[in-house]
Image: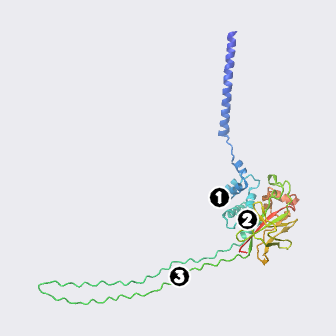
């Protein structure tokens, strides 16, 4: 009986010793299989966690690579990593935003983004009009070539001919004075160097207008007082304003500038307001835009008439707002959603706000 109990206890002891070891081996095997055979790819997660500026930089880098190697398939594969339902549309949206920020048409980043958007078939009318507008042709500057200046001949003296000295010989021979014939050395004449074409610096061409429109920005739905969960409007803000800024030639606020619309419906003077508008600039005047559209320009400064570029057209009517603007401002996430919401009047009709900035091209 005692032997049976001892045998059974021995079996239990062996069993309890094997179970922990088996569990440990199973855990180790699971870790090896998980990390070695099925590694996780976190690239998409990293890209989806990028902020707005980093995401813009990622798209610009793709456009720059495409401009260098022309590999469209590689560019599409990289764009597919974006956490957006329509990557080509996002490229077009970014190009429109760079244009609104006042990027030059020769800016390399803007050129590469527009080229990629056109290749992807997502270019917009705003984009095409921007790159199609004439660019001033630089005035050719004459570069003078070096003109060789002839060196006048120098008077090279002819060394005198040595006359042999007679030596005393048995029969002295008197030395004969043999005259040295004169050497005809031409006299040096002064030859004036031909005149060189010294280029005259071109006179700077003054800008064709006194003021240029440097910025037209649509405020986001959240900046306008609404909410946009997931990039689509959840609730609309109540703003329906156009905030106006006019800067002098050095970039400082210019007071006393009159801004009007083309239809003479609005007339405001800078200095009526003086408040910052997010990171866009300083509001020096404002216009309430009730279910209408407008295009602004500067008409005078302290009573002196001036010429001005016109701003981009802004509106609180859905059908007059470019779809890339609506997407950028968080009113809809995709082009298809924007088109559907505009058609069914389910965005924020009548409640959009803008920031417009002008700058002088000469002192006032």
Name above or below for residue 184 compared with residue 346: below
Q: Which of the two discs, 2 and 1, sits closer to the camera?
A: 2
- The residue depicted at 67 percent of the width and 11 percent of the height is 3
Which sits in the foreground, 293 or 300?
A: 300
Q: What residue is shown with label 1?
A: 65
Q: Residue 87 placed where, x, y %?
A: 74, 56
Quadrant location of the N terminus in the rendered image? top right
Image coords of residue 360 (percent x, y): 73, 72
Rendered location of residue 76, percent (x, y): 70, 55
Q: Which residue is mark 3?
A: 196
Distance between the alpha carbons at the discs numbered 2 and 1: 21 Å
Q: Are marks 3 and 2 in contact (CB under 8 Å)?
A: no
User: Which of the 4 quarters of the picture holds residue 356?
Assistant: bottom right
Q: Which numbered disc, 3 or 2, marks the residue that appears first in the sequence?
A: 2
Dot 2: few (<14), some (14–19), or many (≥20) neighbours within 10 Å?
Answer: many
Say above or below: 96 vs 256: above
Secondary structure of residue under mark 1: helix
Q: Which residue is rendered at x = 74% and y = 51% of the image?
A: 83
């Amino acid at each position: 009986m005692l032997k049976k109990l001892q045998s059974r206890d021995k079996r239990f002891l062996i069993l309890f010793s094997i179970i922990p070891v088996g569990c440990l081996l199973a855990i180790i095997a699971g870790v090896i299989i998980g990390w070695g055979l099925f590694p996780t790819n976190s690239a998409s997660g990293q890209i989806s966690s990028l902020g707005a500026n980093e995401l813009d930089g990622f798209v610009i880098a793709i456009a720059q690579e495409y401009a260098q190697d022309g590999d469209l398939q590689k560019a599409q594969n990289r764009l597919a990593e974006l956490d957006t339902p329509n990557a080509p549309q996002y490229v077009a949206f970014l190009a429109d935003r760079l244009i609104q920020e006042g990027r030059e048409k020769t800016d390399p980043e803007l050129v590469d983004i527009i080229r990629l958007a056109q290749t992807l078939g997502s270019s917009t009318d705003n984009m095409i009009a921007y790159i199609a507008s004439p660019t001033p042709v630089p005035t050719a500057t004459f570069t003078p070539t070096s003109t060789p200046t002839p060196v006048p001949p120098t008077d090279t003296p002819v060394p005198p001919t040595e006359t042999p000295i007679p030596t005393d010989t048995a029969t002295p021979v008197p030395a004969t004075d043999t005259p040295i014939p004169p050497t005809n050395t031409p006299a040096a004449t002064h030859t004036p160097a031909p005149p060189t074409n010294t280029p005259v610096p071109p006179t700077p061409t003054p800008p064709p207008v006194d003021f240029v429109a440097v910025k037209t920005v649509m405020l986001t739905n959240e900046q306008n007082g609404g909410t946009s969960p997931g990039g689509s409007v959840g609730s609309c803000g109540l703003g329906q304003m156009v905030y106006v800024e006019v800067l002098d030639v050095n970039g400082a606020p210019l007071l006393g500038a009159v801004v009007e619309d083309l239809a003479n419906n609005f007339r405001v003077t800078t200095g009526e307001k003086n408040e910052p508008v997010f990171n866009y600039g300083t509001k020096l005047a404002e216009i309430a835009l009730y279910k209408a559209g407008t295009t602004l320009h500067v008409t005078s400064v302290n009573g002196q008439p001036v010429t001005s570029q016109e701003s981009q057209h802004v509106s609180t009517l859905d059908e007059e707002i470019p779809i890339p603007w609506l997407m950028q401002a968080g009113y809809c996430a995709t082009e298809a959603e924007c088109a559907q919401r505009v058609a069914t009047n389910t965005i924020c009709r009548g409640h959009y706000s803008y920031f417009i900035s002008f700058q002088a091209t000469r002192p006032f």
